[in-house]
Amino acid sequence: MTVVLDTGVVVALLSSADPRHTQASAWLAGLDEDLVTSPLALAEMDHFAAKRGSAEGAEALLANIESGAFGVRWWADALRETIDIARRHPFAGLADASLVALAGIVRTNRIATFDQHFRSIAPVRGAHFVLLPDDA
Amino acid sequence: MKKTSLYLDPDLDALLARRADEEGISKAEFIRRTLQAAMTRPTRPKFVGIGVIGTPSPVDYAISENVDRYLTETGFGEE
């Protein structure tokens, strides 16, 4: 199964000072599933890397995209589906809505995030999202 | 080889037959090759740069848990 990747987990992975760094790193080390995110979340990661990160942080983000350490996916109906979800969950914002839509496309309810908002959003598949690494 | 039976959606069955014909192989052989490829797919490349940002956090909250707040405070989308 695929895991959808939210910005916060990438933040935790890249930042040794982040309180979630050890947890996120340990979880990733044991993960055997593919990771995928949306271009909207990728823009957030890029902003973080530029603002908070060093040149090494920005380069690490690019290297991970380039290598396929996590995929970036968009599809023909992505915008329509993202807008529909954002309208149903105004608190979520477009980036989070795009991840919910992406989870439907890759047929998963597993999302790597520290954003507890996802607990109140119903996935396309499954009764609720499994938030990783907390729910692992 | 071990004999296995499975139910297929008629549309998928037709697609498999067409693809197999295009490649000049039997449908069974096409299914075997497809399954073999799925089972031997390369592992996910290693995530690099773990902990590469080593400087202390500039804020008094966990950015990983408050991404939206951090994005707002740092002008995401304004440049």
Image (cartoon, coloured by chain):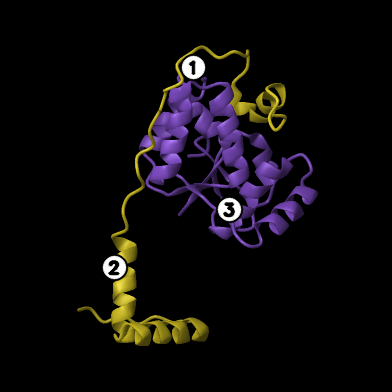
Chain colours: A purple, B yellow
| Left or right side of A111 for B32 | left
What's under tag 2, amino acid-wise?
Gln
Measuring from the top left, give residue A5's x and y in whole percent: 53, 42
Residue contact at pointers 1 and 2, CB within 8 angstroms: no
Using a 10 Å C-alpha cutoff, classify the residue at mark 1 as few (fewer than 14 neighbours), some (14 to 19) or many (20 or more).
some
Whole-Å distance between the Cαs marked 2 and 3?
A: 26 Å
Residue B27 visible in the current orientation: yes
SS at mark 3 in the image: helix
Q: Residue B64: where, in percent of width, then height?
A: 57, 27
Tag 1 residue:
A17
The residue indicated by pointer 3 is A103
Above or below, B54 against B37 in this view is: above
Estimate how packed mark 3 is, as few (under 14), some (14 to 19) or many (20 or more) residues with alpha carbons within 10 Å: many
Residue position marked by numbered label 2 in the rendering: B36
Give the mark count: 3
Q: Quadrant of the N terminus of chain A?
A: bottom left
